Image: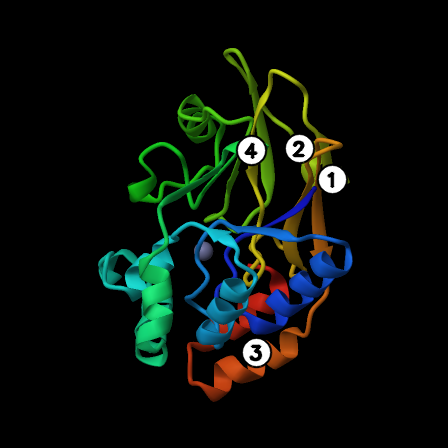
């Protein structure tokens, strides 16, 4: 089975549409999302609705939680806070209700998969996995073969076999990784809607559960349209500019 794992959509309709079209045309029928459907971007309601229609398995991100008032806005920088306040006013009761029902963690035991926004180490704290030390904390809590995270908006992959932990830099270069029996794998799937690895292309991960193969996919999308909408809705200019640079 082909499974698509999306991260940090951040209300970016154009990027989400390109990713979903690519995945659906490639035969994907199972969608996972590692949280942060909303925040930053101009189309929160549309992104919620599309993921809902697809019956995606989704966990809650820190921006989703903040829109609902479950996380204080003081935790966010002024630009993110501005977009969160705007999103809060923009969403209707049904859309907020959909976010409210998202759990912090999702398990797909039939595929040996766990999904969490930041880290399996205290998921409610939304910690970032950006070092071997933080990856170890998450992997020590991981009972499944595979765990997908987001939150940093930078794709990367760690493996752990026994006590031995490795950062697999080849994943970012070759965009592929085959699972090895006995190894636990922690994958950051990057961001659909606001990549921050100095590559503005939208990102998602495909997992072929039979071939046990992971594939990081990068695609072009209409950045200029998203930027125009960000400006039209008077969201902070920096949120438009950064999309062109992948920052
Ligand atoms: Zn995010």
Relative side of 190 to 174, left or right: left
Q: Which corner quadrant of the image does residue 178 belong to? A: top right
Residue 81 is situated, as x and y percent measured from the top left of the image, at 32, 68
Drawn side of residue 194 relative to residue 35, left or right: right
Q: Are marks 2 and 1 in contact (CB under 8 Å)?
A: yes
Residue at image x 68%, y 66%? 18
- Ranked by sequence position, the earlier of labels 4 and 2 is 4
Q: Residue at x 50, y 56 (%)?
A: 8
Q: In this rendering, would 229 be left or right of 211? A: left
**Label drawn at residue 169:** 2
- Camera-side mark, 1 or 4: 4
Query: Dot 2 lies on which element?
Result: loop
Ligand 1 within 8 Å, label 3 CB: no
Left or right of residue 21: residue 139: left
- State the residue position of label 4: 110
* Labels 1 and 4 touching (C-beta < 8 A): no
Mark 3 or 4, nearer chain start? 4
Task: State which image quarter holds ligand 1.
Answer: bottom left
Regarding mark 4 in the picture, which secondary structure is present there?
A: helix
Is residue 94 depicted above or below 196 in this figure?
below
Percent position of residue 96, x then y = 33, 69
Label disc, if present, on residue 227 of the rendered structure: 3
In the displayed orientation, state which residue is furthest to the bottom. 232
Residue occupying the point 64% across, 78% down? 224
The residue indicated by pointer 1 is 173
The answer to which quarter of the image holds residue 136 is: top left
| SS class, disc 3 | helix
């Amino acid at each position: 089975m082909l499974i698509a794992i999306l991260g940090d959509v951040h209300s970016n309709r154009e990027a989400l549409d390109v990713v979903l079209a690519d995945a659906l045309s490639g035969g994907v029928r199972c969608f996972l999302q590692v949280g942060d459907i909303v925040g930053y971007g101009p189309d929160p309601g549309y992104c919620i609705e599309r993921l809902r229609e697809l019956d995606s398995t989704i966990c809650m991100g820190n921006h989703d939680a903040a829109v609902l008032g479950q996380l204080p806005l003081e935790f966010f920088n002024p630009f993110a806070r501005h977009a969160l306040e705007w999103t809060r006013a923009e969403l209707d009761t049904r859309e907020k209700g959909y976010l409210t029902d998202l759990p912090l963690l999702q398990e797909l035991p039939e595929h040996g998969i766990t999904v969490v926004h930041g880290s399996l180490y205290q998921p409610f704290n939304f910690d970032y996995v950006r070092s071997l030390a933080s990856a170890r904390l998450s992997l020590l809590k991981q009972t499944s073969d595979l765990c997908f995270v987001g939150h940093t908006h930078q794709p990367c992959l760690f493996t752990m076999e026994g006590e031995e932990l490795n950062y697999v830099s080849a994943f970012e270069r070759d965009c592929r990784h085959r699972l090895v029996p006995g190894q636990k794998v922690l994958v950051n799937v990057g961001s659909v809607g606001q990549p921050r690895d100095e590559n503005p292309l939208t990102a998602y991960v495909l997992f072929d559960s039979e071939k046990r193969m992971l594939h990081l996919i990068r695609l072009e999308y209409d950045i200029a349209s998203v930027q125009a909408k960000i400006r039209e809705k008077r969201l902070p200019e920096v949120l438009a500019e950064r999309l062109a640079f992948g920052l």
